């Protein structure tokens, strides 16, 4: 398998998130908003593009990505799995513990940054008896909040969203007039948006609660459903992760 761990251009991650948080305000007329639906469900390319701004961390070395083979039933081939982490620290902790338990695990491996789009496309391109399986590892703090929010949460990377009393997603009006349905990897980012709404319009805020669903379920829905409303789904990465990437990326010297 070819190696495709690479650094993502930080601005390509930061700008969409900043725009969504800055101009994607829940408006006064939110509860009565009527959303115009596109004519067709998302294509495979559109599904992948929704993942382009989501940074994730994987473990790799000079030979490519480090895969872990999960045991299968007797007589079946082991399923190679790539562990996908939402934070760099979680990936580093996993690697350190794995090497401590088994020094031969991946002594030369390092943690690399890529986009969820890259991994999704790579997994989709694999075929045969041993397709690449992505195992998403949630950040513990976010998973704890998801479990507290919804007793039915059974694990997976949580996505938080604003919803009305009937359970439907609350649309966010963007500066260009487009209505989107944002799903947040960070509960704190959604809370910040709702806090701003509470200041501007307490009545509108009172009509909204917070819901959660697993990333894995959302990806399956995007891939398999013919619901045209899915075109308006936006996945918003954790702003703290974006900030950490920005701070760790060397800045180019200004042109004289």
Image (cartoon, helix red, strand yellow):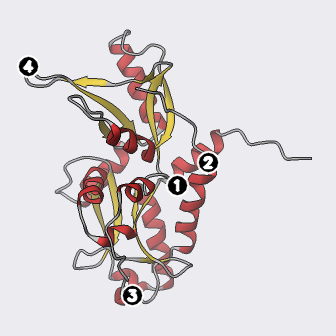
Q: CA distance from mark 2 to mark 3?
A: 37 Å
Question: Which one is nearer the viewer's eye here, 49 or 188?
Answer: 49
Which is nearer the N-term, disc 1 or disc 2? 2
Under circle 3, the secondary element is helix
Q: Which marked residue is nearer to the observer: mark 2 or mark 4?
A: 4
Residue 85, above or below 33: above
Q: Position of residue 189 (x, y in %)?
A: 47, 61
Under circle 4, the secondary element is loop
Which is nearer the N-term, disc 2 or disc 4? 2
Which is nearer the N-term, disc 1 or disc 3? 3
Mark 4 Cα-neighbour bin, 10 Å: few <14, some 14–19, many ≥20? few
Which is nearer the N-term, disc 4 or disc 1? 4
Disc 3 target residue: 203
Q: Position of residue 206 (x, y in %)?
A: 35, 82
Which is nearer the N-term, disc 2 or disc 3? 2
Name the mark on residue 75. Answer: 4
Q: Which marked residue is nearer to the observer: mark 4 or mark 1?
A: 4
Q: CA distance from mark 1 to mark 2?
A: 12 Å
Q: Which marked residue is nearer to the observer: mark 1 or mark 3?
A: 1
Q: CA distance from mark 4 to mark 1?
A: 45 Å
Q: Residue furthest right?
A: 256
Q: Position of residue 251 (x, y in %)?
A: 74, 42
Q: CA distance from mark 2 to mark 4?
A: 45 Å
x 63%, y 52%: residue: 11
Disc 2 target residue: 10
**Quadrant of the image containing the N terminus:** top left
Disc 1 target residue: 239
Q: Is residue 137 visible?
A: no
x 35%, y 90%: residue: 32
Mark 3 Cα-neighbour bin, 10 Å: few <14, some 14–19, many ≥20? few
x 55%, y 61%: residue: 16
x 61%, y 46%: residue: 9
């Amino acid at each position: 398998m070819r190696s495709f761990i690479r650094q993502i251009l930080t601005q390509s991650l930061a700008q969409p998130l900043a725009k969504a948080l800055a101009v994607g305000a829940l408006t006064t007329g939110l509860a009565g908003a009527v959303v115009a639906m596109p004519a067709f469900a998302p294509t495979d390319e559109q599904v992948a593009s929704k993942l382009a701004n989501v940074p994730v961390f994987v473990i790799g070395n000079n030979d490519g990505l480090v895969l872990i083979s999960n045991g299968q039933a007797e007589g079946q081939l082991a399923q190679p799995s790539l562990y996908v982490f939402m934070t760099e620290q979680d990936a580093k902790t996993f690697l350190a513990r794995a090497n401590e338990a088994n020094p031969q695990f991946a002594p030369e491996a390092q943690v690399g940054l890529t986009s969820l789009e890259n991994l999704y496309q790579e997994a989709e391109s694999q075929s045969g008896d041993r397709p690449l399986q992505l195992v998403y590892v949630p950040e513990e703090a976010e998973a704890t909040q998801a479990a507290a929010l919804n007793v039915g949460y059974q694990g997976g990377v949580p996505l938080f969203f604003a919803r009305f009393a009937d359970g439907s997603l609350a649309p966010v009006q963007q500066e260009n007039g487009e209505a989107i349905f944002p799903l947040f990897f960070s509960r704190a980012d959604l809370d910040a948006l709702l806090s701003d709404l509470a200041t501007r319009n307490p009545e509108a805020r009172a009509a909204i609660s917070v819901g959660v669903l697993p990333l894995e379920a959302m990806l399956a829905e995007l891939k398999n459903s013919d619901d045209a409303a899915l075109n308006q789904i936006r996945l918003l990465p954790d702003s703290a992760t974006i900030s950490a990437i920005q701070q760790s990326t060397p800045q180019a010297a200004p042109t004289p």
